[in-house]
Image (tube, rainbow, N blue to C red):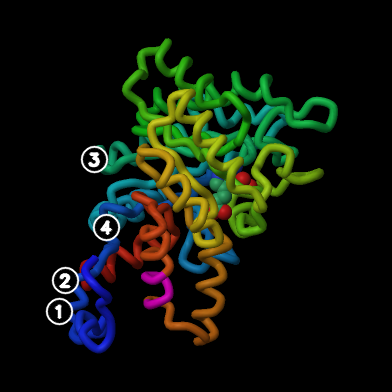
Amino acid sequence: MEGKVGFPEVRLRRLRRTEGLRRMVRETRIGVDDLIYPLFVISGSRIKQPIQAMPGIFRFSLDELSPEIEEVSNLGIPAVLLFGIPEMKDELGSGAYDMHGIAQEAARKIKKVNPELVVIADVCLCEYTNHGHCGVVVGGEVDNDKTLELLASTALSLAKAGVDVVAPSDMMDGRVAAIRKCLDQNGYMMIPIMSYAVKYASAFYSPFREAVDSAPQFGDRRSYQMDPANVREALREVEQDIWEGADIIMVKPALPYLDVISKVRDHFNHPLAAYSVSGEYSMVKAAAARGWIDEREIILEILTAIKRAGADMLITYHAKEVAKWLSNL
Ligand code: PBG
């Protein structure tokens, strides 16, 4: 740099003067292609049940699913993230790897309505176990290695049902490798793994646990999900998952963890997704309902911030409303 250049020659406000200029120098944009919409599917029929703490979000039975899929598709949202709520829960979460389980049937149904819509399936046992933990419980603890086999079977059954991507969210060590191996051995070598690589033991998940009825019946998830205080450990988690074969990395929650997103972006070249979770959504909706915030502006600012931090993909319950705003509907 030659000499010292500053005010009054330099005026940073020059490029902020009109919306036209601001558009030209804008560094981060969110577009409909960034969005992934989570979807809750429940067994039974004629169910479109609102989730109390998540206004605008519902649990759908299979026969009620088509209009939702059509709406998401018409809005141009490229992908949904699928969660199943089974009729029966048991000790080993057998509904998760049932060939005709709720998520498997939902995947088949979605593919019938719109084969182009990318179906990402959450792979975890917690929605399917009666104790609500993400794995097999042995002697009061979640047994890592016993869980791996069940997660691999879950991923395989979902691949067979036609999902495009599997997304393990259980936080067991070694699960990406176990899933990759099982998929490859069965001819599903082209199914990518989106790994919830960095998943914190977060209080922001509580509305989701109401949605899928998966609150742990004893203890908590701190022995497998990450301590919110740690960031170096997040990089180790990502390193392991990439080494085991993850194709897409995820950080979750999003807004309280922008520093983590940013560090992961700096250290790794894999596509990066951020999951703006249920509690983040509920807080915005609750404040907006009281007229305390400008809902639209807040949502767009939050998602822009998550993308600015380094996320390529935004998993958000706001996806439909954002898609509408982006296309001026
Ligand atoms: C399943 C899972 C959870 C979420 C996504 N997958 C809950 C949990 O770990 O308790 C949370 C999503 C959200 O809060 O929106 N393991």
Residue identified by numbered label 3: 116
Q: Earlier in the sequence, mark 1 or mark 3?
A: 1
Residue 99 percent across, percent down from the top left? 49, 24
Residue identified by numbered label 4: 32
- Please say whether residue 327 is one of the residues in the magenta stretch: no
Residue 201 percent across, percent down from the top left? 66, 48
Q: Amino acid at mark 4?
A: Val
Task: Single out the mark in the foreground, 4 or 1.
Answer: 1
Q: Earlier in the sequence, mark 3 or mark 4?
A: 4
Residue identified by numbered label 1: 20
Element at label 3: loop
Q: Quadrant of residue 8?
A: bottom left
Q: Earlier in the sequence, mark 2 or mark 3?
A: 2
Assign the C terminus to one quadrant of the image: bottom left
Element at label 4: helix
Residue in view at x 39 percent, y 64 percent = 303
Locate residue 303 relative to residue 232 in the image: left or right.
Answer: left
Residue identified by numbered label 2: 24
What whole-number distance in Å separates the C-alpha atoms at marks 2 and 1?
Answer: 6 Å
